[in-house]
Image: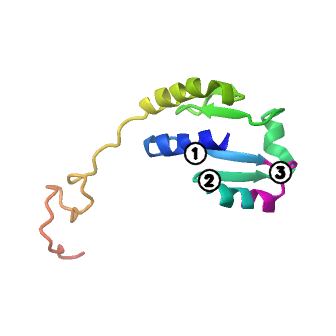
Amino acid sequence: MAPHLVRWHEQFASKGLTILDIDNGDNDTFEALKEHVAEKKLPFAVAHDAGAKTCSAYGIRGYPSAFLVGVDGKVIWQGFPLPEVKEIEKLIAAEIAKIPAAAPKEGGGDGKNDGKKDGKNDGKKEEGK
């Protein structure tokens, strides 16, 4: 599963996808998980579910199991992801399309505005600042 997660992270993270891998703490030690994350250089968050409380709460019975949560916070897909990779990628793209484009920053959006409403940065510091 990790190769798909890494690819999805690389392809969609900059567009709004967040990947969270939750490892069943009953199956793996924390140290083993840390070694795995370092060895594979996983670029997304990985949590160790000590006592498998989260896995139990979500009714996980097989691995890998996955949940795709939409922009509205509702689960839009769950299951065994490997045979359905293309379907999941379509769902990810559809959810990302629902994310509104970031509004431009006040003053032109270049991040260099000196605080003036006209968006011009004359390079001088305003009095009182």
The numbered mark, 2 or 3, whose residue comes first in the sequence reads 3
Which type of secondary structure does the marked residue at label 2 adopt? loop
Q: Which residue is mark 3?
A: 25
Q: Residue at x 62, y 32 (%)?
A: 68
* Residues packed near mark 2 inside 10 Å, few (<14), some (14 to 19) or many (20 plus): some
Q: Which residue is mark 2?
A: 42
Which type of secondary structure does the marked residue at label 1 adopt? helix
- Report the front residue among 50 and 107: 50
Contact between marks 2 and 3 (CB within 8 A): the answer is no
The numbered mark, 1 or 3, whose residue comes first in the sequence reads 1
- Report the front residue among 79 and 99: 79
Q: Relative to 83, say whether 65 is above or below.
A: below
Residue 49 tag number: none
Q: Is residue 68 magenta?
A: no
Q: Residue at x 67, y 61 (%)?
A: 38
Side (left or right) of 122 relative to 106: left
What range of the chain is rendered magenta?
A: 24-34
Residue 6 tag number: 1
Tell me which amino acid carries mark 2: Leu
Q: Position of residue 88 (x, y in %)?
A: 58, 27
Q: Position of residue 64 (x, y in %)?
A: 74, 36
